[in-house]
Amino acid sequence: MKVKDVMVKTAAFCSPETNLGAAVEIMWNRNCGFLPVVDAQRRVVGVVTDRDIAMAVGTRNQFPGEITVAEIATRKIQWCRPEFDIHMALDTMAESKVRRLVAVNEQNQFEGVLSMDDVVLCAETTPGRKADLSADDVLRTLKALYGPQLLARQAGAAA
């Protein structure tokens, strides 16, 4: 199974000049918490999450409409190509501790978003059936993503 078989090809995105108020509106209307930041040539120059926006608005003495996405976007982008094997993308998610990857083409132009939500929906759950993407594959990735956080929380609660 390839990334392109699972990813959202019509994913929401914004430009670096988009203000946080407009970014929140995009997220609200598209029911997402993650926006690739795309320049005029469709190259991904960053990503912004709903958490990034909440922290920026909560820690600055500015209105959301006064802050641009470019000011707060994460520039270290975790990406994949649509033609990559889905397991390669899951490995990237696990190693990078991210739940979403930006899918880009050979010219590094935005093509879509691969999220763990989409991966979960495509996983085969029939026991004993050979599948391109099994529930075990997804569970392994989720454990890599959340395992360290959960262990730290459990250790803190026990103290």
Image (cartoon, helix red, strand yellow):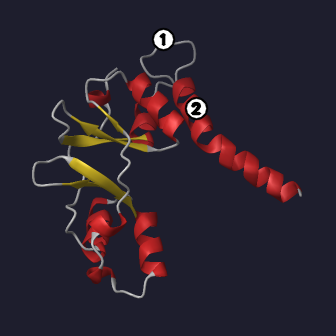
- Of badges 2 and 1, the one in the foreground is 2
Amino acid residing under circle 2: Leu
Q: Residue 111: image x %, image y %?
A: 20, 40
Q: Residue 120: image x %, image y %?
A: 46, 36
Which residue lies under the disc numbered 2? 139
Q: Residues within 10 Å of mark 1 (few under 14, many from 20)?
A: few
Residue nearest the observer in this picture, 118 or 69: 69
Judging from the image, what secondary structure is the residue with disc 1 in?
loop
The number of numbered badges drawn on the structure is 2
Q: Residue 83: image x %, image y %?
A: 26, 24
> Is residue 10 rendered to the left or right of residue 7?
left
Determine which quarter of the picture holds residue 139.
top right
Q: Quadrant of the C terminus?
A: bottom right
Which residue is pictured at 32% across the width and 29% down the height? 3
> Is residue 90 rendered to the left or right of residue 71?
right
Amino acid residing under circle 1: Lys
Which residue is pictured at 30% across the width and 53% down the height? 46
Which residue is pictured at 24% across the width and 48% down the height? 44
Which residue lies under the disc numbered 1? 130
Q: Residue 116: image x %, image y %?
A: 44, 40
How far separated are the C-alphas under marks 2 and 1?
Answer: 16 Å
> Can residue 44 be seen in this snapshot?
yes
Query: Which numbered disc, 2 or 1, marks the residue that appears first in the sequence?
Result: 1
Q: Are marks 2 and 1 in contact (CB under 8 Å)?
A: no
